[in-house]
DNA sequence: GTAGTTGCAAACTTTTTGCTACCCA
DNA sequence: TGGGTAGCAAAAAGTTTGCAACTAC
């Protein structure tokens, strides 16, 4: 029943710090590119392994944009997201958490519910402007 | 501004009927396997193309489970989902739609919001039982 | 007739994994 | 010192695409 002892390697720390320091919900690829600036020999496999470990621990949150690409959120607190269907950009929302819905969901489905997410889809301001040109 | 004229080929019809006739939110692969029973020469590419077209038209809904795998829902009406993190099973919920949240999301983010989804995550009854054996 | 669609195969993207050497606790 | 971890490369998994033949309208 014990979980594995974890180490804070410099790779893991850099990835975590990167995510803590941005609110821009990057993809694994972007994280890989950024970490390489500090650690040119880091491999993409390491990035993925650490992202998986960190999200298992609850230190970060793994999201998915509309296109089945993972994005990662360095803010582990409860909050919801607004996702741009044009460019994949994700913006945090400050809508108060609706935890009580989980009870309804559990009652209806019979699942042991432990979390939920709410995602809004739309076109961000940046894409709205350029959409006019099409 | 016109959208392309669509045809209802037998491939497309079989896929749509399959999805209308189940509430079990299948993956593309499952749909491929099923359609092959009626149309042994159908290709996976055709399945994907039709699923994309049908979801663009709003006839079906494209979902994503926790693992970045697409699942498809033949019920185009507003509803929310409960997803099993063990087996990927998805169950429909009858919680009343919370459309008013979209206004809050739009106001906070500046996006032109046009839809939202709410997903609950938990362990389904089937997996709860087998989890005891571990 | 013709534009949309199919089957097939190859390509592409994202993510995972096996392995040996390495290094944090 | 030992077990978790890194780097590297290969492979897996899911999805998209180019093309010639076909078909629904």
Image (cartoon, coloured by chain):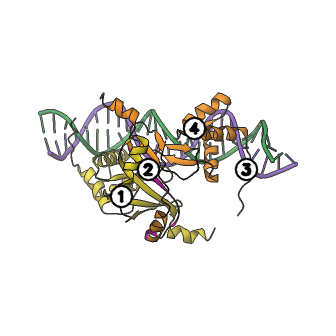
Chain colours: A yellow, B orange, C purple, D green
Q: Nearer the viewer, mark 1 or mark 3?
A: 3
Tell me the SS state at disc 3. Answer: loop
Indicate which label's residue lies in the foreground, 4 or 1: 4
Q: Residues within 10 Å of mark 4 (few under 14, many from 20)?
A: few
Q: CA distance from mark 4 to mark 2?
A: 19 Å
Q: Chain of mark 1?
A: A
Give neighbour class at mark 2: few <14, some 14-19, many 20+ (Cα, 10 Å). many
Give coordinates of residue A5: x percent, y percent.
20, 41
Residue B112 part of the magenta segment: yes
Q: Which residue is mark 4?
A: B22
Q: Main secondary structure of the magenta part?
A: strand
Distance from disc 3 to disc 2, alpha carbons, whole Å, reads: 32 Å
Q: Secondary structure at mark 1?
A: helix
On whether disc 2 and disc 1 are found on a single subunit, the reply is no
Q: Quadrant of the C terminus of chain A?
A: bottom right
- Residue at the location (29% across, 50% down)? A58
- A16 to the left or right of B21: left
B122 lies above or below A27: above
Residue where numbered disc 1 is placed: A34
Looking at the rendered structure, whether the residues under marks 3 and 2 are on a common chain is answered as: yes
Residue identifier under label 3: B6
Which of discs 3 and 4 lies nearer the camera? The answer is 4
Q: Do marks 4 and 2 share a subunit?
A: yes
Out of A13 and B53, give the one closest to the viewer. Answer: B53
Q: Are the residues tagged 1 and 3 within 8 Å (C-beta)?
A: no
Whole-number angstrom distance, CA of label 2 to CA of label 1: 31 Å
Q: Residues within 10 Å of mark 1 (few under 14, many from 20)?
A: some
Based on the picture, tell me whether residue B64 belongs to the magenta stretch.
Answer: no
């Amino acid at each position: 029943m014990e979980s594995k002892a974890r180490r804070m390697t410099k790779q893991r720390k850099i990835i975590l710090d990167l995510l803590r320091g941005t609110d821009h919900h990057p993809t694994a690829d972007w994280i890989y590119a950024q970490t390489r600036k500090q650690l040119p020999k880091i491999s993409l496999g390491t990035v993925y392994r650490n992202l998986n470990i960190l999200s298992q621990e609850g230190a970060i949150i793994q999201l998915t944009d509309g296109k089945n690409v993972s994005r990662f959120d360095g803010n582990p607190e409860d909050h919801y997201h607004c996702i741009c269907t044009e460019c994949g950009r994700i913006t945090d929302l400050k809508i108060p958490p609706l935890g009580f819905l989980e009870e309804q969901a559990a009652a209806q489905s019979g699942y042991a519910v432990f979390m939920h997410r709410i995602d809004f889809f739309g076109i961000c301001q940046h894409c709205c402007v350029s959409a006019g040109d099409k």
